[in-house]
Amino acid sequence: MMKRFKLSDVQVEAILNMRLRSLRKLEEIEIRREDKELRAEKAELEKLIASHKLQMKAISAQVARIREAFAANTPLGKRRTQAGKAPVDIDVPVEAFIEKEPITVICSDKGWIRAMKGHLEQEKIDAISYKDGDGFKFAIPCETTDKLVVFGTNGKFYTLACDKLPSGRGFGEPVRLMIDLSNEADIVTIMKHEPARKLLVAADDGRGFVVPEKEILSQTKNGKQCLMVKGGVEARVCFAVEPNHDQVATIGQNRKLLVFPLDQVPEMTKGVGVILQRHKDGGLSDAKTFRLKDGLTWYSAGKERVEMNLKAWRGERAQAGVLPPNGFPRANKFSGK
């Protein structure tokens, strides 16, 4: 102690002889001071409890301090998040919830439809069995997420969802149970829906037009009227118009063939259409579009035939036409059937 604090012998002796009571005296002073403060605080709290006015005043003071501490320009009050624009609604199509699988849609001659798994080869399609008196009519490779469009002789388009078609087990189900196709009407064609395409539709009275395929989807079983037919007239043909096609070929039941420019056929969404070919006897049997430089093709006896020199049959829309080239099918169909 003498070395650390540089004390003399007398000072060290005095410290060692100091009574412990003197040191405790210092602690007692601190306790009395704390007791005085606590008693004062107790008195304030009792006053606060006893007075509603003082309570409101204390609350106001606390709120003011909080407001000051958390003001927008203080570190505690500064916004930590950024308020952005509301997210854009995402339109999720129903197809997104359908598992995409390849199928082949088979439709019989009497309108029984079914979906076979996978894209079938021709040999397997030929081996498919049908009800007695029924047979093959359409085979359409597509996916379960696709839609089919059915064109009836009543001029209406109907829509079928491929995932809702009956499976390939058995003979399927009649199309008429899935759409409101009247007993007087029949199916002209069934095809996979492709919105970007255009279709040429025509009735047996020789009238027709081009319709964008995106305009033909039906939201109900009743279908969507496109080609207006009445008085015994029936829709006869419906096929896709390829983008590079520039000519239309029509063949009548009277075996007259006419070739004319495609741009003479108007584009419509609904109506009677314009006269494609005049028929003195019978009516329109078939039609197709093609590219002039490729020539006109048709099938006869299972073989494809091509006619490049079409001068004898080229004309203007609404003309009667002339007899087709030698070897043209007696059925007056470009498909030969």
Image (tube, helix red, strand yellow):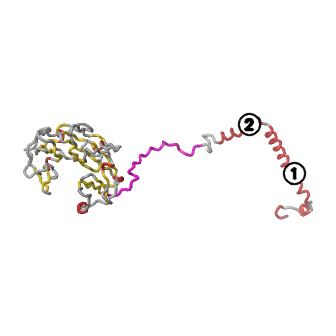
Q: Earlier in the sequence, mark 1 or mark 2?
A: 1
Q: Residue at x 26, y 60 (%)?
A: 129
Report helix, strand or loop for mark 1. Answer: helix
Count up the numbered dots. 2
Task: Please tell me how crowded label 2 is: few (under 14), some (14-19), or many (20+) other residues with Cα within 10 Å.
Answer: few
Disc assigned to residue 29:
1
Q: Residue at x 83, y 64 (%)?
A: 3
Q: Is residue 130 above or below residue 324?
A: below
Point out residue 181 in the picture as x, y percentages from the top left corner.
29, 45
Q: Residue at x 8, y 52 (%)?
A: 327
Q: Residue at x 60, y 40 (%)?
A: 72
Q: Are marks 1 and 2 in contact (CB under 8 Å)?
A: no
Q: Amino acid at mark 2?
A: Met
Instruction: Give the CA distance from mark 1 to mark 2.
Output: 37 Å
Extreme-top residue of the structure: 53
Can residue 148 be seen in this snapshot? Answer: yes
User: Is most of the magenta stretch helix, strand or loop?
Assistant: loop
Q: Is residue 62 above or below residue 6?
A: above
Point out residue 143 in the picture as x, y percentages from the top left corner.
32, 55
Residue of label 2: 56
Point out residue 225 in the picture as x, y percentages from the top left corner.
28, 40
Q: Which residues are magenta?
A: 78-103
Relative horizontal placement of residue 264, taking residue 175 as reference (left or right): left
| Quadrant, the N terminus | bottom right
Relative horizontal placement of residue 35, taking residue 150 as reference (left or right): right
